[in-house]
Image (cartoon, rainbow, N blue to C red):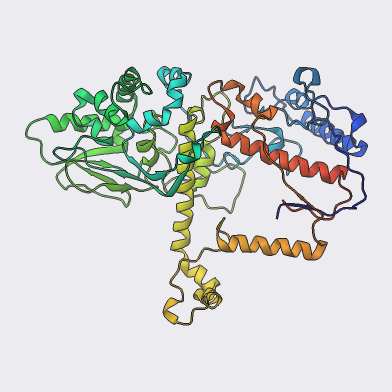
Amino acid sequence: MKEGLKCHPKKKLSVKHAGPSAVGGSSGDTHPKSVKKRKQSTQQYAAEYARSSNPIVFDQNPYVLSLQSVQSYHQHSSASQGFTNDYEDICDCNCVCSYCGAMFWYEERLRVSPSSLSYNRCCEGGRVSLPLEEVPPQMIIDLLGDKQFMDNIRAYNQMFSMASYGAHIDDHVNNGRGPYVFKVSGQVYHWIGSLCPEEGNPPRFLQLYIYDTGNEASNRMRFFGGDNTGSLSHDVVVNLIDLLNSKNELVKLFRTARDKITESDVPDLRIRLFSVIGSRQYEYPTSDALGAIVYGFDYGTRTDYDLIIECKGGTPQRVNKLHPSYMSLQFPLLFVFGQPGYHPGMTLRSISGRTSRRKKELTMNMFYSYQIHDRFNQFGLLLRCGRLFQQYIVTVYCSIELDRQDYVRCNQRDIHNEYLFGLYDALDRGDHYGSEVGSRTILPASFTGGPRYMYIHYLDALAICRVYGNPRFFITFTCNSKWPEIKRYLQKYSHLSANDRADIISRVFHMKVTLYVAILKEEELLGSWRGVRF
């Protein structure tokens, strides 16, 4: 059930609207009460912000939005934009989080504090603090402007990946003229093998950093059609090899292992990748902190998620999603320096003068939410990588979903108590034998997308209809990737299309839906309303 409005059926429908935030709006085509209310709210905000202790201009402090910026938000010209009075424009993404510098639209602000602009979807109000992004090498910046490289960026990344991508990638969805979509089916997992290949087998993935490095470029391109392929460039591959050798800390560790293996009289050698980076959460670690080369079976103190990579033989092992190098091993072109990712030891930062009852543990969802935001005066390599960014987002979503499932699986005792150890479900599906009761993993109603989650929302919709009656209007709101807000946002990313930034499309769409519902409620275009559900 989507949007439902109950109104007077004989109310005349009007589609003319242009509030103060609309480009080139004219009060003659708008509801007077709505326009007056919007103007008063804007003037009230500007006055309260002007009375603040120290309003700072945007250019002087990038993390404080100036009064001039707030006022210019509502002063776009129809002549410069060319919009009609019917279009409701949400303007540009020119607001900045005061804690982490993430860029937001004005409409995404928290409504609890009218005297200041506050956002918490990026860093939880300053409690999430990660290392500042290093500027990528100039070679990577230049390659992002190369159309041939961007069209094949996933192939280049797979060529240098140190772990295999274990998922069934469905490319049939891209047959045709539609936008590119990265789609996988089944579970996503990463496998890593031994340092050296079996006799008679060609090197793959991590082995390409160790074995036969004199012909490394040809060995890498062998799996993509060889040196004569027209889609990939041999020169780009050679330059990327040199770049990762000098910048990536994981690659440096593997190259050191290669040098040790080539020496004579070297005992049995292994690489241990640490699952605990240490207490330096806010700094990028060196190769010595990421892993170590060990001899024999003396591993020392080993934690749960440590990776022990054998020199030869052994079966491929799965990289745990909680390992800090989980993403860096799979996406070397996104994490050029081999920087670690999420691991369970990360904590939230304490804010002076603020008390919170929430746990201090940094969740996986918080970590990745922090990553996927453009920030003021930061390059944002992750968000500029087009199709590779789509693959990364799919991997992130699968990791978060699997982490939630693991939590549910580890807390089945509490869930069983809630559902009487499965008796409710057993009777519902007609089971009569005690051995069948409680044998399944129960997903609670709080698990998004689960059967109980859908059923609870279904009951909520029925309750609304029981109180307010059946909906008179069932409205479908569609998204347009050519909306002016999206096109203006992507002007600074000339090599990207709207399809490469699905996060921006989703954010703009959500703001548009919220604004559309607000217009229907304020101006009563469809009549007086009693209830809305969307």
Task: Tell me the residue at 69%/27% (across/down).
Answer: 484
Residue 362 can be seen in this image: no
In this orientation, which residue lies closer to the viewer: 275 or 389? 389
Position of 25 relative to 365 (above/below):
above
Residue 381 appears at what percent x and percent y?
Answer: 48, 27
Task: Tell me the residue at 40%/32% (across/down).
Answer: 284
Quadrant showing the N terminus: bottom right
Q: On the picture, is 310 further left or further right than 318? A: left
Residue 249 occupies quadrant: top left
Residue 251 appears at what percent x and percent y?
Answer: 29, 30
Toward the left, the furthest residue is 265
In this orientation, which residue lies closer to the viewer: 26 or 480? 480
In this orientation, which residue lies closer to the viewer: 207 or 477? 477
Toward the front, the furthest residue is 176
Residue 120 appears at what percent x and percent y?
Answer: 62, 41
Count of numbered circles on the image:
0
Task: Tell me the residue at 31%/43% (across/down).
Answer: 274
Residue 68 occupies quadrant: top right
